[in-house]
Image: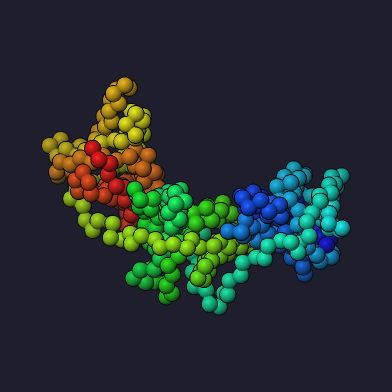
Amino acid sequence: MEIEITQERLSKALNIVSRVAATTKTGLPILNNVLLRADGNQLSLTATNLELATVDYLAAKIQKSGTITVPAKLLAEFISNLPKNTTINLLAKDGKLVTTAGKYKSTINGIAADDFPELPRIEEKNAVTFKVESSSFHSAITEVIVTSSNDTTRPALTGVYFNTFEKSLYIAATDGYRLSEKKFIEDVTSDVFAVVPTSSLQEVLRSVSDDIDDIEMLFDETQVRFRMGEIEITSKLIDGSFPDYRQLIPKKTDINIELNKAEFTRMTKVAALFARESGGSVICETRADDKTFSISAVASELGENSSAMEANVDSDGKVVLNSRFLIDAIGAIDEDKLNFGFSGKLAPVVIRGAKDKDYTHIIMPLKS
């Protein structure tokens, strides 16, 4: 194999695929490598950890076709440190990769490409396919993954649930204490019910660049592929049943108030400082007599804190919440004003943007 390619393009691609190689935990040495395949006028870079595979296709001047695998991290760091605006020559011969750029030269020991795992395949004709603008994908996934779980004993909760309902595609995540749902794509014609690992979606988010307009998603029974420009990321789906979460979302709440996001955030963060001693619990309270919404926290050793803001309140109410969960919920909504609704001390709290009704965030109260 012998090719020529620019430093910028090769470095960008290696930075993407090397992240996947770095996450391998199987102990197989070849999974720490990146597979370089030169064919026609295209160079492909591939890495996998057996759960996730990333392929980046690059236009290059191919002088001789061929394949080789070399340590992904070493090659990525070497290429990234080469001078910008240079042309790099890659020559694979006798199980080694010789890299030359001007006066810089390295020889990296490789492993035969025959030992590299077979890449996952998706029958595109039979796959359920959706396309969405990259900006919409980024905002929707970011809003939802904040409530996914890290508890590997409940695998389905460590992912995001892609599901169709009433001709729309929704995404949802929950850790058992909070829940978020986003109406993702409207007017869909195919059904899908799949749990995608949160770690895979985070890798997709990291790989999306400003020059990518759309993301194509292809689902089969066991996998999903995200195609964006010259990059393809294929992930296994989580084998498990996601909870019937819609029954957990209250159809209405007794107390509903509109709050300024900046002030709401400030009040919550201040109360959280005093809530550390009590497991992060803060008290949210409405008072109809003076039209206020307040957040307070009490710490026996540190002291106590209470902050209030004006709000259009027509009844008294109180609910105790985890301050970190509340901060996460507020931060997930990109609006200046939020709707905060609850129905007593034990019912779920519902937080939405004042304008965007397609996103719902639920927090279960703490026992006071």
Pick the quarter of the image with the C terminus: top left
Pick the quarter of the image with the N terminus: bottom right
Q: Is residue 315 above or below residue 44?
A: above
For image coordinates 34% across by 42% down, the residue present is 326
For image coordinates 45% across by 65% down, the residue present is 194
Q: Residue furthest bottom?
A: 125
Nearest to the observer: residue 319 or residue 29: 29
Residue 50 x, y percent position in the rendering = 61, 59
For image coordinates 21% across by 43% down, the residue present is 345
Quadrant of the rendered structure where residue 230 is? bottom right
For image coordinates 58% across by 58% down, the residue present is 51
22 with respect to 203 (left or right):
right
97 with respect to 286 (left or right):
right
Q: Is residue 70 above or below residue 232?
A: above
Residue 305 x, y percent position in the rendering = 28, 27
Residue 136 x, y percent position in the rendering = 46, 58
Q: Residue furthest left?
A: 289
Nearest to the observer: residue 274 or residue 195: 195
Nearest to the observer: residue 16 or residue 334: 16
368 with respect to 329 (left or right):
left
Whether residue 12 is visible, yes or no, is no
Residue 262 x, y percent position in the rendering = 35, 39
